Amino acid sequence: MKSSAFNNWGYTSSRLSWVLYPLSLFYAGFMRLRSYLYENSHLGKRRLPVFTVGVGNLTMGGTGKTPFVIGLASALINRGLKVGVISRGYRRKGRKEVLVSDGETLLVSDPALCGDEPYLIALKTRAFVAVGADRVKAFSLMEGLSPDVVILDDAFQHMKVVKDVDFCLIDGTRCWGNGLVFPAGPLREPLSALKRADALVMSKAFNPGCLKDVEGVLNRAPVFFFFPGISHFLNRGKRVPPPSRGVVVTCVANYQNFVDELKRMGVEVTGLKVFPDHHRFGVKEFEDVGNGNIILTEKDWVNLPSSLKESERVFVAVQDAEIPEELLEFLGERLAFR
C-alpha cells in the first residue's frame, strides 16, 4: 500500500474495504466485548492518585491529538497547575518506561527512544512527560514531582486507568471515514463507543455533518471546537517569514489539511512526498527533492536525521494550540469537584 493510501485508508472508496468487512465485524465485536468487561468491572482498572484526563480519538490517523495535548498542558500550567503527560510512545525503541522531561530539562536526546509525539510535547511544554505501555508504571516515574493533573495521551481505548474526564477528538475535515471498523475502515471501535466520552472535540474544521452520524450516542456530552493553525515558521531555530515555495515532505496522517493551509497562506507547494504516520526519515529520502525549500510540520522535523535539522533549506511550520475557554471552564468544574 502506498504511503498516501496508507494515511487515507477508509477515507476514500475502495473495494478492498468490503472484502475486509467480515474481519471488521469480528474486530468490532471484540472491541465491544472488551469495553463491556471494563465498564462492568470484570477486568481490573487502576486509578492514579491525581486528577486524570484522557485524550484520544475513535479513528486512526491524525485528529490533532498532539497539538491538543500541548495546548491543554500549557493552558493548565499557565493556571498554576503542575501537569504530567503520559504517552505510550508509539514506535519507540525499547519497552522500558522512560521519563522524557521533568518539566525543566529534556532528559532524552534521541526521539527514537521515546517516540516523536512525546518528544515534541516535552519540547513545547513545561509538563512532566513519561512514556510506557503500562501507564501506571510510567506515572511512577513522575510521581515524586507531585503533578496536580495527568493527561493520558492517545488513551480513548486505554481503559485500564480510570479517567476523570475523557476527551475524544474528531477530525472535522474527514469525520468517520467510511464508518467501518478496522481493517475495513478507519474506526478503532464502533461509533457506539462514543458513549464513554465526557466531551467530543472537533478539530481542524467546523463540520456539523459529523455529529449527525452520532446523534443519540453522545447523550448530553458537550462538543468543543479546536482549530490549530500555522502561527509562524522556523529555519535553523529562528523565526522567519513563510517561504514563497517549497516541497512538502511529511509523515503526518492527514497531510492534506496542512497542504491546504500552506496554499491559503500563499505558499506555492511545488511537490509532495508523503510517508506513513510516525515515519523516521533517512537522508537518502531527500535526494530526489531537488535544491529548493523543504517544508515540514513540527512532528516531521522531530523525525528528521540530525544532519538535516539545521539545513537552511528546511522550513518548519509551527502550530498554535489555543484551547477554547469554554473547554477549560468545563474541565475546571470537574477539577473543582474531584
Image (cartoon, grey):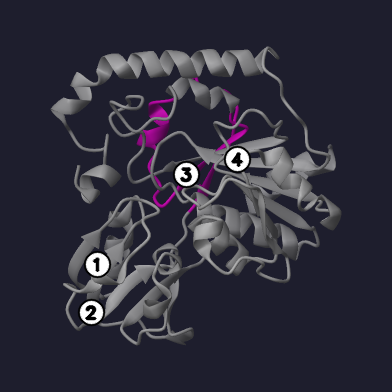
Q: Which mark is residue 245?
A: 2
Above or below: residue 209 compared with residue 115: above
Q: Please name the residue that numbered disc 4 is placed on.
A: 133
Query: Nearer the N terminus, badge 1 or badge 4?
Result: 4
In front: label 4 or label 3: 4
Point out the image quarter for the N terminus. top left
Q: Can see residue 322?
A: no
Check disc 2: other Cα within 10 Å, few if <14, some if 14-19, many if 20+: some
Name which quarter of the figure residue 251 lies in.
bottom left
Give the Cα distance between marks 1 and 3: 34 Å
Tag 1: residue type?
A: Glu
Residue contact at pointers 2 and 3, CB within 8 angstroms? no
Label 3 SS: strand
Where is residue 262? Give x, y as percent: 30, 69
In front: label 2 or label 1: 1
Q: Please name the residue that numbered disc 3 is placed on.
A: 202
Give the Cα distance between marks 4 and 3: 27 Å
Give the Cα distance between marks 2 and 1: 20 Å
Name which quarter of the figure residue 258 lies in.
bottom left
Q: Which mark is residue 285?
A: 1
Query: Nearer the N terminus, badge 1 or badge 3?
Result: 3
Query: Nearer the N terminus, badge 2 or badge 3?
Result: 3
Q: Can see residue 333?
A: yes
Indicate yes or no whether the magenta region holds residue 267. Answer: no
Tag 4: residue type?
A: Ala
Tag 2: residue type?
A: Arg
In front: label 2 or label 4: 4
Q: Is residue 69 left or right of residue 179?
A: right
Using the image as rendered, state which of residue 320 and residue 187 is in the foreground: 187
Label 1 SS: helix
